Image: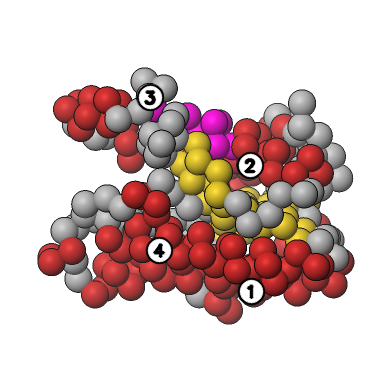
Amino acid sequence: MIDLSGKNVVVTGASRGIGRAIAIVLAEAGAKVAVTATTLEAAQKTAREITDAGREAIAFAVDVADGENVKEMVASAVKELGTIHVFINNAGITRDNLFVRMSETDWNQVVGVNLTGVYHCIKAIAKPMMRKRVGKIINITSIVGQTGNPGQANYSAAKAGIVGMTKSLAKELSARNIQLNCIAPGYIETDMTRDLPSENKEQLLSMIPAGRMGHPEDVANLAAFLASDLSNYITGQVFNVDGGMVM
């Protein structure tokens, strides 16, 4: 079992789905987790699940698209936890539409949260990690950042941008003992995918060699490995969790 005892972790977008699963799995492995969401109430809900299970968690509200808000959150997390060993960028939104119908607002909102939000978070946490000469940054991208997807030009562009940013910063920060990697989930069973029409689900399943949709814990288990010391020689990589879909 992965042992994250003594590790302090921040997970953005952790109120539900993949982010929630990551926060819970890492806490079960022994990490102290700072759970963030756009509202404090949503963050506290996940944090309570963790503390009710006898593990440690604190909660923060943050809008990752707001650089100053992110700086304040990171400063508070450092004050509360001390060294931040792992930072997981999971927060994201969708505003799907065919490109010719996509408004500039929908484009800017998705890129602002999904890509610029990652920039804000890494910008805020990089210096504290550099001073300590230790850190792992795990960015949650998506299979559609590699394959594209009709109706998701904004989301796909943002997720592809995360990959390029991760690889560039892995080269910049490796000398300070900071590793950056991406996890690219495929179709994971979350609130959004549960509401898909049955015919859409059947079409998706036909494209997945594993024959099933993934679970949030499938992503969280990989995040736990990348957060651990077992991954110290791994940086700048993209790991697909997609049942073989991208092959």
Q: Nearer the viewer, mark 2 or mark 3?
A: 3
Q: Quadrant of residue 139?
A: bottom right
Color scheme of the displayed model: secondary structure
- Give the overall secondary structure of the magenta segment: helix
**Res 136 → quadrant:** bottom right
Look at mark 4 in the image and give the residue it sits on.
158
Q: What residue appears at the point 84 percent right and 39 percent down from the top-left corner?
A: 5
Give whichever of discs 2 and 4 has the lower sequence position. Answer: 4
Q: Is residue 181 above or below residue 109?
A: above
10 Å crowding of disc 2: few (<14), some (14-19), many (20+): many
Residue 87 visible in the picture: no
Quarter of the picture containing the C terminus is top left
Q: Which residue is mark 1?
A: 123
Q: Which residue position holds label 3?
A: 209
Q: Residue farthest to the top? A: 211
Decide which of tag 1 and tag 3 comes sooner along the chain.
Answer: 1
Q: Which residues are magenta?
A: 213-220
- At label 1, the amino acid type is Lys
Assign the N terminus to one quadrant of the image: top right
